[in-house]
Image (tube, grey):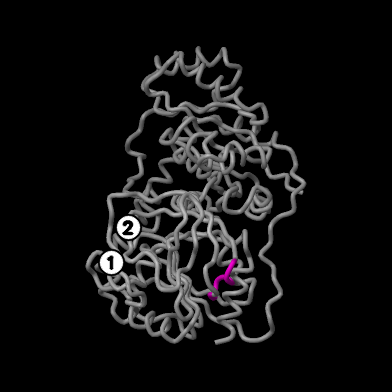
Amino acid sequence: MVSTPRLVIAAPASNSGKTTVATGLMAAFAARGLAVSPHKVGPDYIDPGYHSLATGRPGRNLDAYMCGPELVAPLFAHGAAGCDLAVVEGVMGLYDGASGQGELASTAQVAKLLRAPVVLVVDASSQSRSVAALVHGFASWDPEVRIGGVILNKVASDRHEALLRDALDESGLPVLGVLRRAPQVATPSRHLGLVPVAERQGDAVDAVRAMGERVRAGCDLDALMALARTAPTLADEAWEPAYAPAQGPRPVVAVAGGAAFTFAYAEHAELLTAAGAEVVVFDPLRDEKLPAGTAGLVIGGGFPEMYAPELSANEPLRRAVTELALSGAPVAAECAGLLYLARELDGKPMCGVLDATARMSERLTLGYRQAVAVSDSPLAAAGTRLRGHEFHRTVLEPGAGPVPAWGMHQPERRVEGYVQRGVHASYLHTHWAASPEVARRFVEHCRAR
């Protein structure tokens, strides 16, 4: 049974201020001494980093496409266990989801699955009375979505605020906060969204602190907490990574981290640990050796293109990665990991495990994917079906090796990625909570080394 008070922070459209409000609420409530559980709708890796900084807890994703609607509440319960409040940041507009699949993976669907009240963040910078029509439309579109109040963002002046409040008096929804325009709180962005916390360090701490102060000054925290407490108890059992591993030594699984490899779901390390592995994080920008006793290697997503010269300059580690891969050890590489294993990235030498070259592109590749494993690998048996997503502005040539990793079935049919020796490398990001056998299989291959 899950009784954690909870709020979903949504908006009519992207760039309305969801991240500022959600992160600011997390920081403001945490400053009150509450244990706040941070969550993000969808596959995004970057916003949860700011959430984690605000709360001191792992930022967790709730993705109804990759994990299935049936896992949303259990995963939420797993993250929110023992917390005083949970704040869930939405994705895109409230009702936007997987392309062509109705409400699937939308913030609205997640709010319904969690039976959580929604706070609508409205960019009021170019409207006054029309805000009431906008809010009314969103509140009445789906009667199963309960919008409990509005936070007005980018309000220009006291007069502007008065006009907005007068208009919203007719809507029946309370104004729970008003935030003035404040560019000093803005977080820098680039080709894949916000710059990750790991790359900003002190600046990110300052930004999260400023968000918390701004939200604390502009929002009615007591009213928001009262709204969160109206969420009914959920009957769903919490998801658990528990698994009884085989007896014997715990193989060391090295997981790439640091500023170049920041994309990871918290549940992956939990699943690897539950399957019997000793998870050790290392930084390919700084560490010249793999962790002692490394039996398997996981290199997730991130921004290697921003650090290609530094990654290339770390020749001792590149050699160690190559030697491990050539030995047949299990290696799982997603997106950034795929590029790191290539021969070169933007002309800079990489590990050379894969006979491929990578470069930055003007074209953004973004979207959910359906995939089937083409051949056996340490991650999946041939024929295994998974859902995932792609998110990159790079091109790998060739895009698939002699033995591809995946056959894609959405949006077009194609093969992609590389399987060779113990290496499984692909652009596809997956969420292992939906398929825990992936982690178990990987650790079993490490143990067999």
User: Disc 2 marks which residue?
Assistant: 394
- 398 or 86: nearer the eye? 398
- Whole-percent x and y of residue 38? 56, 48
Q: In this picture, is 97 found above or below 148?
A: below
Image quarter of the C terminus: bottom right
**Residue name at image x 46 percent, y 49 percent:** 367
Task: Say what amino acid the circle numbered 1 marks.
Answer: Leu
Alpha carbon of mark 2 to alpha carbon of mark 1: how far? 9 Å
Which label's residue is closer to the chain start, 2 or 1? 1
Q: In this picture, is 97 found above or below 426?
A: above
Residue 255 visible within the image: no
Report the magenta stretch's main SS: loop
User: Disc 1 marks which residue?
Assistant: 345
> Which corner quadrant of the image does residue 434 belong to?
bottom right
Q: In this picture, is 226 found above or below 174?
A: below
Task: Tell me the tag on residue 68.
Answer: none
* Secondary structure beneath label 2: strand
Crowdedness of circle 1 by 10 Å Cα count: few (<14), some, many (20+)?
many
Q: In this picture, is 75 found above or below 267?
A: above
- Whole-percent x and y of residue 387? 55, 56
* Secondary structure beneath label 1: strand
**Residue name at image x 57 percent, y 33 percent:** 221
**Marks 1 and 2: in contact by CB < 8 Å?**
yes
Q: Is residue 78 magenta?
A: no
- 7 or 305: nearer the eye? 305
- Whole-percent x and y of residue 438? 59, 68
For the record, the magenta segment spans: 377-383
146 relative position to 289: left or right: right
Task: Say what amino acid the circle numbered 2 marks.
Answer: Thr
- Whole-percent x and y of residue 166? 50, 12
